[in-house]
Image (cartoon, rainbow, N blue to C red):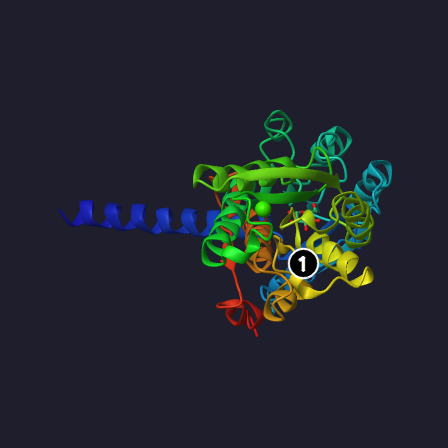
Amino acid sequence: MKFKNIWTSVIIFYTIIILLCACGKQQQDTPDKLYLGITCYNQSDTFINQLVTCLKDKLSQFENDNFEVTMTIRDAAGSQRTQDDQVQELINAGCNILCVNLVDRADPSEIINLAKENNVPIIFFNREPVAEDMMRWEMLYYVGADAKQSGIMQGELALSAIQANKNIDRNKDGKIQYAVLEGEPGHQDAIIRTENAVDTLKNNGIELEKLCCGIANWNRAQAQNRMMHIISQHQNNIELVLANNDDMALGAIDAYKKLNYTESALPVFFGIDGTDVGLNAVKDLELAGTVYNDKEGQAAAIAKLAVEIISKKEITNKYTYLPYSKVTSDNVNDFLNKDK
Ligand code: BGC
Ligand code: CA
């Protein structure tokens, strides 16, 4: 009996030693340094610029005495070729995770090949690669938001405004004459947002008449130009402007200001994003509403995912989508004070 006890103790002792060694080895495998290489499609994009600022902040929160975080940020300034070169440069510089905001979301092949050859995982964000490309390697992830939800919410905001204020139908013909300002063709957030905003209004019994749709590539100055043109064609007849993002809604407002339109002749404007300028325009009652694109949530998700990948945690979701929220002058202060 005594003999058996000794053997049991010896076995337990060795099991513990083996387990301790295994833990030690795992710790050795886990780098205590995260070196993130970030490349953006265009850093002059208002939303992307704010998202990257949030990302820097969220990443620095993971830094401590045992875990070093470094990041390098590159601006592809609208060129996929430049972005491909930047990815090579970031890998050469020793980045162990890449965060890629693709220029051309349909053309990530070169980047995926480089990452795979060098075994550097990629977190794509905001500009979603197609599913087929995402399946090309298990170390590809995406963080973003659901375009359909933002379109539905923009439609709901416009619906409430139209129901609450009969004067939006300025010519009293029972229909809402509207114009659309759309983001880049081919971007997952452009057509889907427009379609869902318009369908939401129609499905809720609002009669619509589409006057015009202009592409302004997410850009305020381009939207102002497009809107000047639309106004020259339709003068006082535009009652509603649906813009795929805040910058384009603000560009439309700029156009009316430039033409010195009086307030009573203005349409109602709706955006998406809740950028700082967008939220302030809601507060000033220039924008009737916007849909909050949760940059803090997306940045936090990217940072957490990067740390988990480096720590070799098991990750079950390749995709993370953060929810949108509706913003009007009633709740805008909650968003203006976010994270402050
Ligand atoms: C945002 C836009 C931004 C675009 C860039 C969209 O999700 O709403 O403001 O310009 O992403 O890819
Ligand atoms: Ca009307």
Q: Is residue 183 visible?
A: yes
Percent of width and height locating residue 333: 53, 72
> Quarter of the image holding residue 234?
top right
Name the residue tied to disc 1.
266
Percent of width and height locating residue 131: 59, 28
270 relative position to 322: left or right: right
Nearer to the camera, 305 or 334: 334
Q: Is residue 169 above or below residue 83?
A: below
Percent of width and height locating residue 334: 50, 70
Dot 1, crowdedness within 10 Å: few (<14), some or many (≥20)?
A: many
Nearer to the camera, 240 or 122: 240
Q: Secondary structure at mark 1?
A: loop
Nearer to the camera, 266 or 140: 266
Q: Residue at x 52, y 63 (%)?
A: 328
Q: Is residue 141 visible?
A: no
How many numbered marks appear?
1
Circle 1: residue type: Leu
